[in-house]
Amino acid sequence: MAKIDIHVNILRYQPDSDEKPHWQEFAISVDDDSTILDVLNEIHWKHDGTLAYRRSCRSSICGSCAMKVNGRNVLACETPIHRFGRKFKIEPLSGFQIIKDLVVDLDPFFEKLKRIKPFLIVDKPLPDKEFVQTPEQLEQIGESTLCILCAACSAACPSSWPNSEYLGPAALLKAYRFVFDSRDDCADDRLEIVNDKNGVWRCHTIFNCMEACPKKIKITEYLSRLKLKVVENSL
Amino acid sequence: MEKNFKQTSRSGAVAWLLQRISAVILFILLLFHFITYHFLTRTHAVEYRQVLERAQSWWFPLLQFAFLITALYHGLNGVWSVLEDYLSSRGWRLAWFSLLLTVGLALLFVGTLTIIKLYTLKVA
């Protein structure tokens, strides 16, 4: 493991002293197999303790450390620096209010998620043990269950940027996940919620969400199925 | 069901569905256009007389008019769908919608005139 010198530009914003965000460059030395999170830790621990960013699991499971590196939304903990060379820039996710440095206000994101009732709603009598699903039924929801709610998709969606009311790909994916779940009994309610001008119809199949998703979920494909389901259900 | 349908027409579902249907129709018409214009020619190259003869057969104006209507709907509906992302005020929405409608009607008029002109042109 060798040490390399890198130059990192970070978009800084300290609400107490800054009027607007500005770039700050850090020249540091890190191991060549470091991740973006390692770089941020190195800066935070040894160079500038005021740098704010979110982190938790370090295993691409919690979704806390989504941010933009050289214009691409990534999870800092799983992204090696060699993808970007020795000079790169780090910014907070687009489309959200910056609270401090790389920390953005995700309240609107989770409010939208709540609107589609992101939990299993069962009206039928509960089984004695667990619900049984066939492989085909499981296949229906497939990888849509893998979402870790990092908000990388919603932040990458151009339809979300000018329209803060748009539910966004993450909430819509969650709606898909429950609408197509054989155990759930609330599909009609959810389809009514997403069948709105700020719901699934604001998705223009741009594919940015799929590109940004760190779990490689085919979000656009699932949203297309959701659109078809809404049409089938209401026409 | 009626409530659902009303909500669906307001929400954008109908526009989405019609956009897909018009895309399929456009694809078929475009394919037909290319085949009849560029591959079903009697001579080595496409000639003026041949084009005019074809333009004056009974099916040609009908197909061209269908092409015109579908292309206009598909194009303008697509632009409106994108504009809706950016237009939140009622006034701006009305202004842009009126502009698109005017552009659409003007293009429909010019397109229809061209089809009629081709159909009625005397072959020398």
Image (tube, coloured by chain):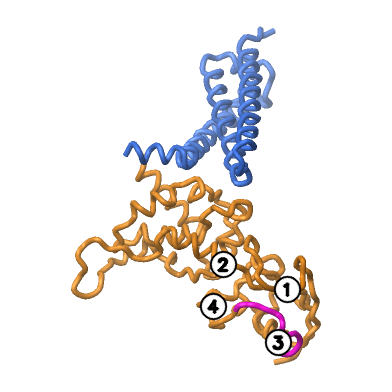
Chain colours: A orange, B blue
Question: In the image, is A112 to the left or to the right of A65?
Answer: left
How far apart are the two marked residues, 3 and 2, measured between alpha carbons? 25 Å
Q: Nearer the viewer, mark 3 or mark 2?
A: 2
Asked whether the beta carbons under mark 1 and mark 3 sit within 8 Å of each other, the answer is no
Q: Where A76 falls versus A41 (above or below)?
A: above
Return the residue nearer the eye: B69 or A167: A167
Check chain identity for marks 4 and 3: say if they share one: yes
Toward the front, the furthest residue is A16
Is residue B34 highlighted in magenta?
Answer: no
Badge 2 marks a residue whose secondary structure is loop
Asked whether the beta carbons under mark 1 and mark 4 sit within 8 Å of each other, the answer is no
First in residue order: circle 4 vs circle 3? 3
Return the residue nearer the eye: A80 or A153: A153
**Residue identified by numbered label 2:** A106
Q: Nearer the viewer, mark 1 or mark 4?
A: 1
Check chain identity for marks 1 and 4: say if they share one: yes
Residue B78, position as x, y percentages in the image: 58, 39
Which range is magenta? Answer: A45-54
First in residue order: circle 3 vs circle 2? 3
**Residue identified by numbered label 3:** A42
**Residue identified by numbered label 4:** A60
How far apart are the two marked residues, 1 and 4, measured between alpha carbons? 31 Å
Asked whether the beta carbons under mark 4 and mark 3 sit within 8 Å of each other, the answer is no
Q: Nearer the viewer, mark 2 or mark 4?
A: 2
Badge 3 marks a residue whose secondary structure is helix
